[in-house]
Amino acid sequence: MDNSAQGGKAYGFLKSQQEEKLNSINEAFLSDPQYAEEEDLGSKLEMFRKKYMEFDLNDKGEIDMMGLKRMLEKLGLAKTHLELKKMMSEAVGGTSKDTIIYNDFLNMMLGKRNAILKLILMFEGMGKEQEEKSAGPRGRKTFSDLP
């Protein structure tokens, strides 16, 4: 029996289990009255879930120091170990932890606290939107477009 296929299946199963777990957390946030006023909550939660899964490198449902480091390097923002520890502490609400669990991640992204990591991820998202809008040739102008 080929073990590499087995590893791939196990990994896929792990990822789908993790996705189900994160989706159930998203469901809880959708029904939470605290976030009832949040605009486009469903699509934001979906975007946050994808971003979170991308950087959960240990596949335990949490972002560890290496995952955070890799996330920021991918965005072109390499940080020192001390800066990473500070960001993790901000993300989890001031407690000193070695990982960011999904609930803490969502509380950071949806909450009022302006954690550095939240700001970086928000601007990264905005940058992508700007790139998508400016892609391709400009549309033809018509007489009605003239001043």
Image (cartoon, helix red, strand yellow):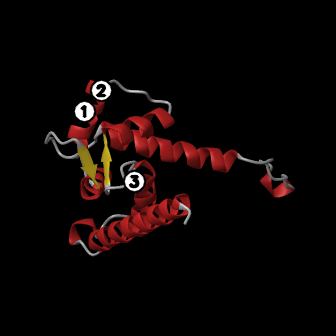
Is residue 59 visible to the viewer in this orientation of the structure? Answer: yes
- In the displayed structure, 46 sits above or below 137; it is below
Residue 40 in view of the camera: no
| Tag 1 near tag 2, CB within 8 Å | yes
Q: Which amino acid does label 1 sit on?
A: Lys
Q: Which residue ends up furthest to the front in the rendered image?
A: 1
Q: At numbered mark 1, what does the secondary structure look like: helix, strand or loop? A: helix
Question: Residue 102: where, in percent of width, then height?
Answer: 29, 57
Measured in 3D between alpha carbons, the distance from the residue under mark 3 to the one under mark 1, in whole angstroms, is: 18 Å
- Residue 56 lies, with reference to residue 11, above or below; the image says above
Indicate which disc, 3 or 2, sits on the residue closer to the N terminus.
3
**Image-quadrant location for residue 71:** top left
Residue assigned mark 3: 52
Q: Position of residue 45 (x, y in %)?
A: 39, 63
Q: How many marks?
A: 3
Residue 32 appears at what percent x and percent y?
Answer: 23, 71
Disc 1 residue crowd, few under 14, some 14–19, many 20+, Cα 10 Å? some
Q: In this view, does 83 lie to the left or right of 141?
A: left
Give the class, few, some or many, for how many residues have Cα within 10 Å of label 2's Cα (few <14, many ≥20): few
Which residue corresponds to the image point at 45% horizontal and 29% vertical from the top-left?
A: 77
The residue indicated by pointer 1 is: 85
Judging by the rendered image, the residue that carries numbered circle 2 is: 81
The reply, left or right, for residue 115 in relation to residue 46 is left
Determine the secondary structure under disc 3.
Answer: helix
**Mark 3 crowd level (few <14, some 14–19, many ≥20, 10 Å Cα):** many
